[in-house]
Amino acid sequence: MFTLVPILALLLCLQAGPARARFRPEDVSWRQTVDLYRSVPCLSDDELAYGREIIRGLGYGGQRVFRRMCLMPGISFTKSRQAWQELLELGLSFEQVLCFEKWSRLPGVDIDLALAALPKIGKLSYEAGKSFRAYMDLPRITARNALDTIPLLTTLEDANNKAVQGFLAIADMDAIHALDGLVSLARLKDNQARACGAFALVKGMDTRTMLDALPLLRQLRQDDAWNARCLFRQQGMTRDEAWRWLIRYFALPPEIQEKQYYRLDGPHRRQLLQAFYDGGEELIWKINNLHAITDRFGFEIPESVLRRYSPEQLYHRFQRLSPQVQFRFGTEFYPLIPAGNRARMIAILRRATAADRLQTARDLVSADIYALLSQGSELYDSSFRDILVPVLKQRIRSRHDDSLLDFLKQTDPGNMLVADFIVSLAQKGKLTTFFPEDDTLQRQILKLVAASAFRNEDSILLFSATFMHLLQVLTPDARSFLIRRMAAVADRGAGSFSRLVNVILQYYLREYPGLLAPADRVLILRMAIRHGTEDLGRYQVTPFAAWKSDHRLASVSIFHPDDDGRRSFLSNVRTLLRGGYRIELSRTYSLTPPDGAMRRRVRRLAAEAGKKGKARPLLELFRAMEHNHFAVALVRVINGITISHAQYVYSGEDNEERLLERFLKSGDEMLAQRGHSYWRSEQLTEPLEKLRRERRISDRDLTSKQRFLSLGSCGGVKAYTRLTRMFLGHIDILATIGTGMAIINDPYNRNLFEVVARGPDTMTWKDVADRSAFIFRGGRGQDYLQPGSLTAILHKIIEEKKHTGAGTGDRHGEDHAALHP
């Protein structure tokens, strides 16, 4: 006689709540499993009834696994009980279930081997499981052979397992070569593994080439490996091409790579330059993060935290630096470890980190630096001006006779990035470092700029955002030359691009006539006669009447729980308190409503903070918000309209999704993402994408209202464009293409709602800009893009074309007299 107690007790613990309510007899999976269980030899009626109850609690995945086990040699009631015990304890993921099912179909599987396999398969991560299933696709693999790979697969990082999956997918791969390769793949580090995965997936890859490549891939520097990955992933890449790139370029030392780049023909240079540009985000992240000792998110580790590090922890941080820097500083650093002199170790680590930032730039070929500088708005100012620019300038001086024109022609024969590079230099105040004084040379460079800037919508958007910086540094003659080239593009270009260039020129004639020579103004007016005058005022229209229809204006600001987030929170709350706002709980954005004690605590802290915003109570409030997942709002009534600025502290992926879902369905007007740009994905883009993917928000939710987005983070036009498209064009944005500043973001967000509350419904974004001019006094915030700016207008034109089907070549109005300043 058997006892039901042990397994039933476990079942009750694991199946919280009324299990019978969730499992119905008509459930297809349950019925299929019970039907197979009936085939187990020599079952008594009691054993059958017992099994029926236990199978209810296995869950869908466990039932699938047990169905396979019912078909195995040696299955019995006793073995079934062992299986149920394992399945209930393990709680296999769906990927692990797929692994078991596939493994169970291999030769030589019986119930005893299956029971031994369950805990092993239960250790497989998602990526390791995919590798395990890929291994079983090889010919002549036995069940025991497959299980032998699990200890290795479970030790691999996700990047290595993804490389394994590509490696095992090679058409002529077999079990013997697979085992040899797995050992080599396990030795690859980070980007080396990513490059390997991309190499394995190129068209026509075979086992011999792959095995020959593995030792070379293992020797690649991390930066080279990342660029190689980007190149191998290009459309149309073949096995022979990938192999030649590996042996003739990426496996070479940096100084040889520099020479080799300029030996390539034009098409191959363009191909490699595209890979450098595509891989720029990773290198920009690395160079930016080396501005200080940072954590894996790129945020600076405070001195107080570093002092609590053990000598071993400081040693591990030192080991993350490049070999050259470790060698240079190691003689000072290593003797301090046994002595435990942490203060000196930290000081040397800081110097070594700064040196590694420069070393990273020096190890890049000139074309790679050029590609990074072309994405200038993504780089910290210090990374751009103090690290990359000096290295490239020295290269141009020594290897191109200090000729920017020669460098551009040799490095970028297809003019792919010339415009982005030049306008980035202008934006960051470094164009004069490279630009020739000779008018003839300037014009030749500007020809390349014009050929590069108007390739597609994205390149035009970037050009528009930095055009002012470029005009300000050009000589009048060079400025006129560029405008003539732009007019020529508008005259002969495709309808869509022609209209956008036309808008840029008309905008500058209307808003900045002082930057244009008389002949330039005449040229633009004549062009307007040919192409039609754009009614730019229609893109300055505001949604303020709709905003005020419910007599309230509401925003939510998102802060990260780190030092920068705390500083931003203090700054923003103090700005509002000084403006007469009061602190209260936010019902809309308190994901976990606080209890009575917490409510009393919030009121006490608000009173202690006072109108001056004392730091201690506000920081205590910030910590309480972080740990208890509630939000506060700063509220004031102006002109009969209640203004509410909610403050929320980021507390994880799930809560962020709930917060954004509430924002989009609440009817609130403003969303402010505060803090560094590298939090933008966690706080904004990733949760928004997931909400749309899971259909928790619809297109109607995004387009039901024209909202306002305030980006406090450093960012670029690419981020601006991406967010505009994510909100389906129904968003007006305040953003910077340089460095975000609280002295701009705090007063602008406060002032916007107050201007709306006090002003007429008919105000335009230009009116708002005029009433916000005090914020930008003295040249502050020159890199900010306000609603109604040229870049904002171009985005609206492009989005209008997408949603109405009107070509951007369509003309709106013929009143060219309106262009006269």
Image (spheres, helix red, strand yellow):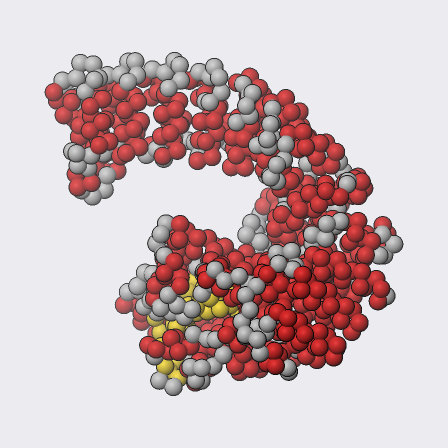
At x 74%, y 79%, the residue is 518
Asked if residue 367 lies left or right of residue 549, the reply is right
374 versus 508 height, above or below: above
Residue 139 place in picture, x, y as percent: 48, 17
At x 55%, y 17%, the residue is 176
> In the image shown, does 733 or 108 lie closer to the viewer?
733
618 versus 562 height, above or below: below
Asked if residue 401 lies left or right of residue 272, the reply is right
114 versus 623 height, above or below: above
Q: Is residue 721 visible?
A: yes
Among all residues in the image, which is located at the extreme right?
Answer: 401
Q: Quadrant of residue 48?
A: top left
Residue 721 place in picture, x, y as percent: 54, 60
Among all residues in the image, which is located at the extreme front?
Answer: 530
**Rendered-image quadrant of the N terminus:** top left
Q: Quadrant of residue 178?
A: top right
